[in-house]
C-alpha cells in the first residue's frame, strides 16, 4: 500500500532519538549523524533508479542528492562553491536555488520556507525528497512494506476548447488561483487553447518567507564585516544571527537598523566605521543566509571576545557556543 512520503521512515531507534535531541544546525554540521538508508529503493515511473550516492535519512525524512535527482527529471544543476548554492533549471523552465543548511528556497524568484533544509554530506548536496519532487513537477509516495519511494513524473496539462483552467485545476486537485500562481499568470483570460500548464503545486507555496530589503541585507553585512570580517564564514553567520535574534526578542528593538544603532554593543554604528564599511563576499553571504533562516547559534542575543570583554554581566550569561574568537550567549 502506498502512503504519503511525509510519514516517518523506519530507521534505528537510537538514531531518531539522537536526532530529535539536537538542533537542526548541529545535525547538518555532523555528517556522521545523517544516516544512509541502505535498504530504500527509489522508483521513477515504475522503474528502479540506480543511484551512485546513497539515499540518506535525517529526522525521519528521505533525502536524495540534488544532482542525481535533478538529472532524473531532465533538469540542469549549476553549483556555486563559494556560496554553497545549487541552482536547478528544470525541464519545464522553473528555476530553483538551494543553499547548504538554508531553509529558504528561491523558486522562480520568490522565497519560500521548506520545513527541512538541504545539507551537504561527502561532497554532495542533499534535498528532502518530497519537496524536491514537487519542485521538479512530480508526485511522490511511500510504500512501507517495500521500503520504496515511488516517483511519478507529471506531464504538463494542455488547455483545449473543451478543457479550460477550471477543469484542469479540478483534475489536479487544486484551485484556479493556485494554478495561476504556479504558472506565473495574472488571470485566466490570458489562457488560450494550446497553453501548457504546470499542475503540481509545491506544498511550500503555503509558506512564503518573511521578506527583507536589500538595505537590511547590506547593513547586516556591514556590521558583520566590522565585527568578524577577519574570521570564518561561520563566525560571521553567528554575528548576523545575534542581530536577527535581537529583532525577534521583546527586550530589543524590532528592526535590524534599530538593533544596530541603539545601545552600546555596536560602537562602529556611532563612530563612523559602519558607514564606511565595505562588506566582502563572506559577510554578504552570511547576512543573506541568516536572513534566509540559517542559524548556527540558536537564540543567542549577545557575543563577546572573552580575552577582551570581562565582568559580572558577561560571566552571568549562558554560553550557547564559541565560534572563532567570540562566545555567543543569552
Image (cartoon, rainbow, N blue to C red):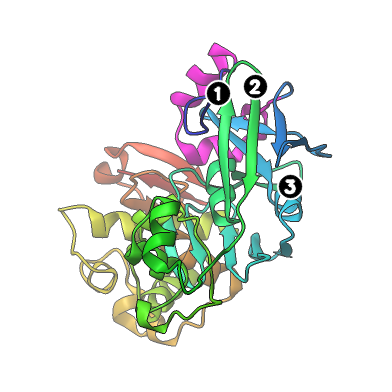
Between circles 1 and 3, the one closer to the viewer is: 1
Does residue 124 appear to the left or right of 265 in the view shown?
right
Q: Nearer the viewer, residue 255 or 89?
A: 89
Between circles 3 and 2, the one closer to the viewer is: 2
Label 1: element kind: loop
Which mark sits nearer the N-terminus, 1 or 3? 1
Q: CA distance from mark 3 to mark 2?
A: 23 Å
Magenta portion: prevailing SS class = helix
Residue beneath disc 3: 124
Horizontal and vertical percent position of residue 86: 66, 61
Q: Which mark is residue 9?
A: 1
Does residue 31 appear to the left or right of 310 in the view shown?
right
Q: Residue at x 34, y 54 (%)?
A: 206
Can the viewer see residue 321 in this picture?
Answer: yes
Queried whether the magenta region covers residue 224, the answer comes back as: no
Q: Nearer the viewer, residue 9 or 236?
A: 9
Amino acid at each position: 500500500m502506498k502512503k504519503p512520503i511525509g510519514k516517518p521512515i523506519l530507521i534505528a531507534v537510537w538514531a531518531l532519538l539522537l536526532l530529535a535531541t539536537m538542533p537542526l544546525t548541529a545535525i547538518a554540521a555532523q555528517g556522521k549523524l545523517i544516516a544512509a538508508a541502505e535498504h530504500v529503493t527509489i522508483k521513477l515511473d515504475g522503474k528502479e533508479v540506480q543511484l551512485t550516492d546513497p539515499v540518506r535519512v535525517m529526522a525521519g525524512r528521505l533525502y536524495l542528492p540534488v544532482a542525481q535527482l535533478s538529472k532524473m527529471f531532465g533538469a540542469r544543476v549549476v553549483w556555486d562553491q563559494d556560496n554553497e548554492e545549487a541552482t536547478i533549471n528544470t525541464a519545464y523552465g522553473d528555476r530553483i536555488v538551494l543553499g547548504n543548511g538554508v531553509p529558504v528556497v528561491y523558486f522562480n524568484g520568490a522565497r519560500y520556507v521548506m520545513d527541512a533544509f538541504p545539507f551537504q554530506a561527502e561532497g554532495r548536496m542533499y534535498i528532502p525528497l518530497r519537496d524536491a519532487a514537487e519542485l521538479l513537477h512530480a508526485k511522490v509516495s511511500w510504500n512501507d512494506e517495500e521500503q520504496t519511494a515511488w516517483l511519478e513524473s507529471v506531464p504538463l496539462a494542455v488547455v483545449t476548447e473543451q478543457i479550460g483552467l477550471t477543469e484542469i485545476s479540478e483534475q489536479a486537485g487544486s484551485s484556479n488561483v493556485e494554478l495561476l500562481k504556479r504558472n506565473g499568470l495574472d488571470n485566466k483570460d490570458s489562457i488560450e487553447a494550446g497553453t501548457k500548464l504546470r499542475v503540481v503545486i509545491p506544498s511550500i507555496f503555503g509558506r512564503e518567507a518573511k521578506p527583507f530589503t536589500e538595505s537590511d541585507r547590506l547593513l547586516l553585512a556591514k556590521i558583520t564585516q566590522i565585527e568578524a570580517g577577519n574570521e570564518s564564514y561561520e563566525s560571521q553567520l553567528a554575528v548576523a544571527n545575534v542581530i536577527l535574534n535581537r529583532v525577534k526578542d521583546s527586550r530589543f528593538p524590532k528592526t535590524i537598523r534599530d538593533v544596530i544603532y541603539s545601545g552600546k554593543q555596536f560602537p562602529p554604528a556611532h563612530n563612523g566605521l559602519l558607514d564606511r564599511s565595505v562588506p566582502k563576499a563572506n559577510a554578504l553571504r552570511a547576512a543573506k543566509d541568516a536572513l534566509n533562516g540559517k542559524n548556527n547559534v540558536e537564540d543567542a542575543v549577545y557575543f563577546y571576545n572573552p580575552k577582551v570583554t570581562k565582568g559580572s554581566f558577561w560571566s552571568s550569561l549562558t554560553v550557547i557556543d564559541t565560534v572563532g574568537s567570540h562566545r555567543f550567549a543569552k
